[in-house]
Amino acid sequence: MDGNQLLTAALFLAVVLLTIFITFRASRSTSGTNDFYAGGCSFSGFQNGLAIGGDYMSAASFLGISGTIAIYGYDGFLYSIGFLVAWLVALLLVAEMLRNSGRYTMADQLAYRMRQRPVRTAAATSTVVVSIFYLLAQMVGAGLLVNLLLGVESEFVKNVTIFVVGGLMIFYVTVGGMKGTTWVQIIKAVLLMFGSLLIILLVLAHFSFNLSDLLGTAASNSGNPDFLNPGGKYGVDTTSKIDFVSLGLALVLGTAGLPHILIRFYTVPTSRDARKSVLWAIGLIGAFYLMTLVLGFGATAMLSEGKMADVVESGGNLASVLLAEEVGGGEGSAGGAILLALIAAVAFATILAVVAGLTLTSSASVAHDLYNSVFRKGQASDVDELKVARIAAGVIGLIAIALAIPARNLNIAFLVALAFAVAASANLPSIVYNMFWRRFNTRGAVWSIYGGLISSVGLVFFSPVVSGKVAPDGKNLALLPKDIDFSWFPLENPAIVSVPLAFFLGWLGTVTSREPAAEERYTELEVRALTGAGAEGAISH
Amino acid sequence: MSPQTHDQADRHDPVYDHLHASAEFTELRSRYRRFVFPATAAFLVWYLLYVVLSMWAEDFMSEKVFGNINVALVFGLLQFVTTFAIAWLYSNYSTKRLDPLARALNERYEQEK
């Protein structure tokens, strides 16, 4: 290990120690399920806005989007915009109503007027599936990141990293609950914003704050005359264009269906605070995605040909990190080493915060929906439920580790896109129907959730991502070996089919069911969602 | 939370029926929907237009506006502007037009329950 790697390791360790310290502090004020799942509803809108940013801006955006811009040019930016615009769905249609009508999990607001057991089972299943895909993406990303930083290609290092990240996330969640997780996310958001801001200011200063200059240099370095124009990555043929529209749909409709985002709305005392949190989150996330534009084009404009080859080799993930080294003074300089270590530590903190949020969400759903409501018929004591939630966090963490190890070479962007597609298909339709359609009933909800879940995962299974995708040069791009090909669905992103299907199934299930609609419960839900009358409030200690 | 009943969720408090039937609630719901439905339709169409133009109107999107800044970049940045603007408008609208009604109804609930 040379001096630079030692510095990086020291900063990683500092991030880890800081988060461990915070988790212990948070554990002191965590006593019941309300603290564990919802942080006692005690966070302010601003704090929660930061935490939402910390929960949402994953390593895939920080490393992946800037990397996609650095390699493919403009098309990486298309991604960022989908991730941001999506927040309007959360702001206008979901956040406040969910805060008023639920308590701890996504299933709560469905269970408000449906038969408890089937809808909670369905919602918990989709929560766990979405969270596991997302978790895998982050853990695989962590393994990759550490390998990149150590400059080795070692499966052993990846496995060790996955174990460490998995162990830490189990620790944050079981010990610190929602309070610990939230503070880890807040710290990460602050580190990420300041880290990115520092780098982009240095990049912009290099070009005398002339964006056009920066873009021009990036375009000429890339050697691609269309580098600044859309279409570089997705515009190859009609199928890839439709594929991108499908991805865009998944991003825009998936965000407000991501369970780890939804449960953040329960951590504030009122729906007005939930609104404020989303407003803060939109500001932060918007600013961050604007910065990825400069990070991505900055990398192409400033990195040498040799460094750019490393970026391409890493699938783009190294772009921000190497850019940090470059603006700090380049390889071998003290400034370069410090900034590289700093940005690497920020990326690591990013991963830790996201995995903690995901583990907490799944364990809440397992304990609150499956264990208490389905298995114990709502009779479990608070102490029992809390115990089960902690055990569930441990088990989910172990499952994630066990899955991440064989998955360590999967493409992260694919896993994240899949999580968004499943969230958009399985979760969003029933949330929207439940809030706005009086007649919606249990069968509609269950059909919509399972239909969206099965169709989105199923279509990906039969897509070129899993089998039968071969690059023009003969390289295998699919998950399975080259000689296996059972793909028949042409798109890599299923949302354009699975989202309308889930909406259709929600309608069909509802109109074919003989179950009388719980009219008066909908009346109650509507009043409660819009006014907050009778909503779960903060618990004072 | 009142004890959870198990099958069909069935606790029901008649106070909600009164609130639901009140003129204030009807007004609150219609004000809410009058803003969010058109706004949602607008930003979804606006975003899809951007995606479709990026994919199928490359020549138009590649026009240079000034320097190296092309239509695609301006269009993309405008998506940020409209997102911030809709968020800001909704924040103002809900503070002025929704929150007072919601508060009044909530107070009635506290009195009647």
Image: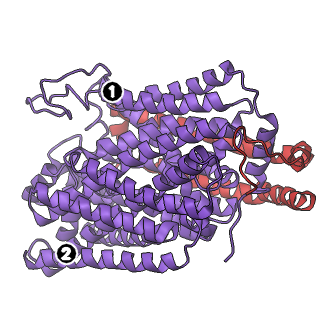
Chain colours: A purple, B red
Q: Report how many numbered discs are placed on residues in the image.
A: 2
Give the percent coordinates (x, y) of residue A394: 39, 59
Q: Nearer the viewer, residue B92 or A380?
A: A380
Image check: A41 left or right of A330? right
Q: Nearer the viewer, residue A256 or A102?
A: A102
Give the percent coordinates (x, y) of residue B109: 87, 57
Q: Which residue is mark 2?
A: A9
Give the percent coordinates (x, y) of residue A11: 25, 77
- Looking at the rendered structure, the kind of residue marked 2 is Ala
For label 1, count other residues whose C-alpha is less than 10 Å away and answer few (under 14), some (14-19) or many (20+). many
- Looking at the rendered structure, the kind of residue marked 1 is Leu
Image check: A327 left or right of B34? left
Chain of residue at mark 2 = A
Q: Earlier in the sequence, mark 1 or mark 2?
A: 2
Instruction: Report helix, strand or loop for mark 2.
Output: helix
User: Eyeballing the image, is A147 above or below A219?
Assistant: below
Query: Residue shown at 68%/37% (left/top)?
Result: A114
Frontmost of labels 1 and 2 is 2
Instruction: Report helix, strand or loop for mark 1.
Output: loop
Q: Which residue is mark 1?
A: A491
Query: Residue shown at 32%/31% (left/top)?
Result: A492
